[in-house]
Amino acid sequence: MTLPLHAVDVSVLVPAKDEAENLPLFLDQCAATFVGRPERYEVIVVDDGSADGSWALLESLRPRHPFLRAVRHRACRGIADALRTGYLHAHGAVLVFYPADLQFKPEDIPRLVGPILAGESDMVTGFKQGKYEKAFVSRIYNWLSRALFDVRVKDLNNVKAYRREIMEAQPSRPDWHRYMIVLAAQQGFTVSEIPVPLYPRHAGKSKFGLGRIPIGVLDMLSVWFELRFGQKPLLLFGMLGALLFGVGFMAGLVALYMLFTENVGVRAVWTVIQTCLILGGIFFATGILGEQIAVQRAEVRELRRRLDESAQPPAE
């Protein structure tokens, strides 16, 4: 038995990759947390290509937990895709991103959704309280993010709750779930934070290693570019092209002056002129192409929004 659609206030989205050892206890703790709560919950576990029998386990756990809904990816597609799949199957007006590894206890979920249900915030993120193996890397990551995006929260990549419309506006890009707070704040949504205790992982091992650091930095720069110039790429490339054309023009005037007044030609100056004109033309052409791509992206984004709306089941 599953909850009727109109009975759901909060949808907890749980990406799970090889978490069979953690899922039974995680769902038991969810059940204990939800009992007696005024808001009504569903838990959508997205099996992201697990090879440890997670899907069969979820099937067996459904009769015990009426709030459980399970969705399956037959191959691993990553957290961002898992969250989007969960969102497309969710019915709550408030969504919660929560891992299944029990480093965060389900008992803290109501504290995350409370300010949103009370109308005090559009998004609530938790900042870790406790020993964290990758604390140094996390501090560097959060410091860089705050410097680039000017979003004053302590932990940008953690458990979080948010209004459904925030997910509707998110670009579908791998690993960009890490920047959901940044993207939401840029779109005008309010963001707040609360402390959330961090516990040792119950079972299994982390899926993230040091190899994720350069990927994270490049993703961060990509998000920064998207927010600053994604809608108007000609603003960046046109400025660079104009600057190079200006340098080439000034160098040309100097070269002509020296040629006519002193009858001296400087090969290096003519090389600078040619280089500036070629690079300036390339930057301008890149900006114009970027503008065309930006128009296409806007149209695709609108089509995706309409498709997502049409895919939602009618409210009862």
Image (spheres, grey):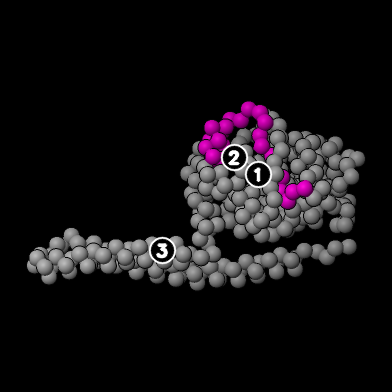
Q: Which mark is residue 207?
A: 2
Amino acid tagged 3: Met
The residue identified by callout 3 is 239
Q: Which mark is residue 32?
A: none
Amino acid tagged 1: Lys
- Region rendered in magenta: 120-143
The residue identified by callout 1 is 17
The residue lying at 60 percent from left, 46 percent from top is 151
The residue lying at 81 percent from left, 64 percent from top is 313
Marks 3/1 in contact by CB < 8 Å: the verdict is: no
Mark earlier in primary sequence (2, 3): 2
Residue 312 position by quadrant:
bottom right
Extreme residue in the top direction: 131
Q: Is residue 174 left or right of residue 203?
A: left
Give the percent coordinates (x, y) of residue 50: 66, 45
Mark earlier in primary sequence (3, 1): 1
Real-space Cα separation, disc 2 to disc 3, in angstroms: 42 Å
Q: Residues within 10 Å of mark 1 (few under 14, many from 20)?
A: many
Q: Is residue 258 left or right of residue 115?
A: left
Real-space Cα separation, disc 2 to disc 1, in angstroms: 9 Å
Please tell me whether residue 168 belongs to the stretch shown in magenta.
Answer: no
